[in-house]
Image (cartoon, helix red, strand yellow):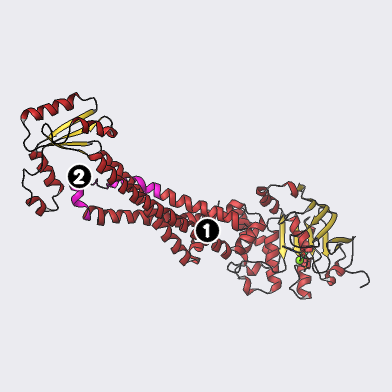
Amino acid sequence: MIELQHVTKLYPASSRPALDDVSTEIDKGEFVFLIGSSGSGKSTFLRLLLKEDDPTRGTVIVNGKTLNTMSKWQVPKLRRTIGCVFQDFRLLNNRTVGQNVAFALEVINKPQRTIKRVVPEVLEMVGLEGKTNRLPNELSGGEQQRVAIARAFVNRPLVLLADEPTGNLDPETSEGIMLLLERINRTGTTVVMATHDYHIVDSMRRRVIELSEGALTRDQSRGVYGVGR
Amino acid sequence: MRVNFVLSEVATGLRRNLTMTVAMILTTAISLGLMGTGLLIAGMISDMKEIYYDKVQVSIFLADGVTEEQRAAIDQQLSDSPEVANHIYESKDEAYARFQQQFSQQPELVQNTPPDALPESFRVELVNPERYELIAAEFPNGQDGVDQVRDEGDFLDRLFSLLNGARNATIAVAVVQALAALLLISNTIQLAAFNRRNETNIMRLVGASRWYTQLPFILEAALAGLIGALLAIGGLVVTKILFVDKTLAGPIRAGIIPPVDWGAIAFISPVIAAAGVGLAAVAAYVTLRLYVRI
Ligand SMILES: Nc1ncnc2c1ncn2[C@@H]1O[C@H](COP(=O)(O)OP(=O)(O)OP(=O)(O)O)[C@@H](O)[C@H]1O
Ligand SMILES: [Mg+2]
């Protein structure tokens, strides 16, 4: 499903690699936490999976495709199989909740019929069925993140990448978001989530991959955030 | 392709940078208008060449006291010459009639010129216009009833080099304007892409094709190019009606300057439109490739 082989990423004009000879494998349907202190390379890891950037060395494989050799025009097709969620939600503020979710389908040419059917479905799934016509700034942070998750999931991706999705949310709201991500994971979608939130990691007991200054220092199934915490 | 989506994006984009859009359209219009003018002048020059060069290359003016025999001898000599393709005789009356027509705008000049002031002449068309010297040598000035041999081509060459200069200058200014227009288009597209970066970022993440993401910007530029082209064509039409057809009416009727007919404008209009749309679209595409991450 996802495989990194000796992946090193050096950004230009930086002395230390953002990822340093990282090798790992993530199977279909897994739920993985990506942890590590600030600057340890978590976001870089996720960006490479999206082919937002190319590794300096090593091979990245996602959904059976080797990204290194993938040509530019094939990238959109890859991204249609990957959903993305970020700390800052990234919603379009001049569009309603329903329009934000529909946007993701419109721009990949899904038929209007399909859009009319699946948008309400996914909004119901994330618990926003009554708020279709609200604008993002009429929603709480947690609700905005639900919209973002709905948008990421509406095309039923094989993989969901989440970069600190609870970073801006209080613990209770975060818990709701985590329940949602677990639910998505149960549909068979692989979830990779970068986070600093040790409460969440410790309580969920899922696989943990820890990065430290770009190097993979721990890979533990049913792991916790920090040893000795 | 979702036509509504693309069109509404284009409309929003153009409205959002209204000042830039207006600047882009106006520069494009000026550039295309000048280009059209250059093309019209070029067409005019070739029409004029047909009017002048083909008819007369050398004039042999006859002396006032020329005799029947001398005139007949010259006629015969021209008929026999292998250098001469064609020649016609123009009497004093015919010369005066032509003069009256050419200078119909200046009645005083016509009034002050007695009908017999203009010399009779042979108008000669050469097989090869460059070989004027040979003919001139055959008819020495001031002998056998010949007053003067004049190379009309020489005068025409100077006239046409002037006209060619005007055409080249117009086209040069058009090119400079076009450069300014292209830079403005590039700038406007960068601005438009910046304004819509949230949308395009999401489009990129959810896997919209490059084409789908870029199309609204390219259409935006192409539409501006089209509006610029229409303004330019409108400008040419107005110039024809207000300047060419009014101010130049006299010389045109006299056959000195060829008219700019609607056919010529109709012929270059699609060229202008295609140039406007094509250049704007290409400029936008190149800008997106070079400067904008989509
Ligand atoms: N576009 C970039 N250009 C240059 N250096 C970069 C770039 N993006 C990240 N880096 C560097 O790469 C390293 C890893 O950054 P990354 O964003 O992957 O860390 P992170 O683990 O996501 O941190 P955080 O927890 O703060 O989000 C850092 O040292 C960072 O400065
Ligand atoms: Mg990060």
Q: Nearer the viewer, mark 1 or mark 2?
A: 2
Q: Amino acid at mark 2?
A: Gly
Please say if the residues under marks 1 and 2 sit with CB atoms less than 8 Å apart: no
User: A224 left or right of B68?
Assistant: right
Q: Secondary structure at mark 1?
A: helix
Residue found at the far right of this picture: A228
Front-lying residue, A205 or B63: B63
Q: Residue B36: percent from the left, percent from the top? A: 36, 50
Q: Residue A138: percent from the left, percent from the top? A: 62, 74
Q: Which residues are magenta?
A: B247-272
Please name the residue that numbered disc 1 is placed on: B186
Q: Residue at 70% x, 59% y: name it.
A: A153
- Compared to residue A1, the image places residue A17 above or below, namely below
Q: Amino acid at mark 1?
A: Ser
Front-lying residue, B161 or B54: B161
Please name the residue that numbered disc 2 is placed on: B255
Quadrant that contains the C terminus of chain B: bottom right
